Amino acid sequence: RQEIYRQLRDEPTVTKDGVDVKLQLNAGLLVDLPSMEDAGADGVGLFRTELQFMVASAFPRMQEQHSLYSKVLDAAGDKPVTFRSLDIGGDKVLPYLRLAQEENPAMGWRAIRFGLDRPGLLRTQIRAMLHAGAGRSLRIMFPMVADVAEFQQARDYVERELKHLRQHGHDTPKELKLGVMLEVPALLYQLEEIYKEVDFVSVGSNDLFQFFYAVDRGNTLVAERFEALSPSFLRALRKIVVVGDKMDTPVTLCGELGGQPLAAMALLAIGYRNLSMSPASIGPVKAMLRSLDLSALSEELLKQLEAGKGSEDIREFLSNFASEN
Ligand code: PEP
Ligand code: MG
């Protein structure tokens, strides 16, 4: 199988009926970058910057952050990289940052909430990214945004840092795109408003699923109770991409879901064209989509969703479709 995936590496990422898809890589350290070439990925769709913070023994300085981001951009060459600002708190702890014990850490002081309350840290990171992106294209996204105002505040910090850099005669990125992770269900009800503000959206299906069903993603007692290929979750995911298309805002998905071939099939069928996943998933997903008659699948799956089929029917339908192809 590995050999088959290797052979696929330089083949186009296109379905049997000719629909172009982008498959990108989820990464977090410099050592992940060679996987991009090895797997034939179209860029880094999610660079988890917290990894550098988690393996350090103290907050990485601006220079250290800058140096990592520059190397990542160098390694990616012409391919795009989407940096995510620090996503700590919840299950991601920093040994040198002693935070108060929280009753519900996943819903607590984490990600962008932490960043906006500690603007010194967030601005340092933004500055490091802007330095690294000087003269090139740069993409930054913010995790766990639950309200349009949080994105606007974060963007304000980016603009202030840009101004500061210009005033001091530094080069700035030649192109800068700012986006949000869509992983808090509240954003589902502000889709038009958020799409007006951002350059792109990336669905964090791990957290979105967790908060959608109120089910702890790491708790085996409950984690398997609900199904990501349920009609309700698929309808939510579909709405995100339909409104994105309508408003001309690019939507990608970077949770684990995109890396499971059967789920990836469903995501393509409801309208996703850009998925970001761990390196090992790229081969299997690419193999799946190159033999997929997407328009036939899409038509059938949407019918099933409209007909109010249950999760089991949907999964069975997808497996049958996959084995007949
Ligand atoms: C997600 O929530 O789907 C995601 C990609 O982010 P993380 O797994 O790092 O929380
Ligand atoms: Mg997340």
Image (cartoon, rainbow, N blue to C red):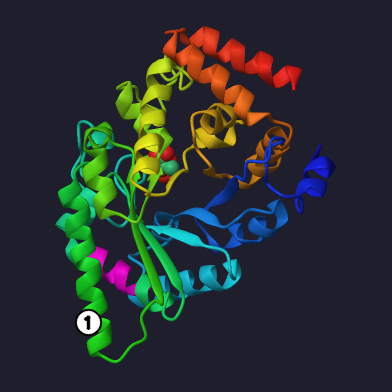
Q: Give the range drawn in magenta.
A: 121-128
Residue 230 makes an appearance in the image: yes
Residue 110 makes an appearance in the image: no
Task: Give the crowd class for mark 1: few <14, some 14-19, many >=20 residues within 10 Å.
Answer: few
Magenta-highlighted stretch: main secondary structure? helix
Q: Position of residue 280 (x, y in %)?
A: 66, 43
Q: Would residue 116 be counted in the magenta stretch?
A: no
Q: Position of residue 282 (x, y in %)?
A: 65, 43
Q: For mark 1, give the secondary structure.
A: helix
Quadrant including the C terminus: top right
Residue drawn at (31%, 74%) of the image: 127
Which of these two is toward me, 243 or 69?
A: 243
Q: Position of residue 49 (x, y in %)?
A: 41, 58
Residue occupied by mark 1? 164
The answer to whether 234 is drawn above or below residue 254 in the figure is above
Which of these two is toward me, 74 or 314?
A: 314
290 sits to left or right of 122: right
The answer to whether 78 is drawn above or below residue 164 in the figure is above
Q: Where is residue 34 in the image (x, y as percent from the top left)?
A: 66, 61
The answer to whether 251 is drawn above or below residue 154 in the figure is above
Which residue type carries mark 1? His
Residue drawn at (42%, 74%) of the image: 133
| Quarter location, residue 323 | top right
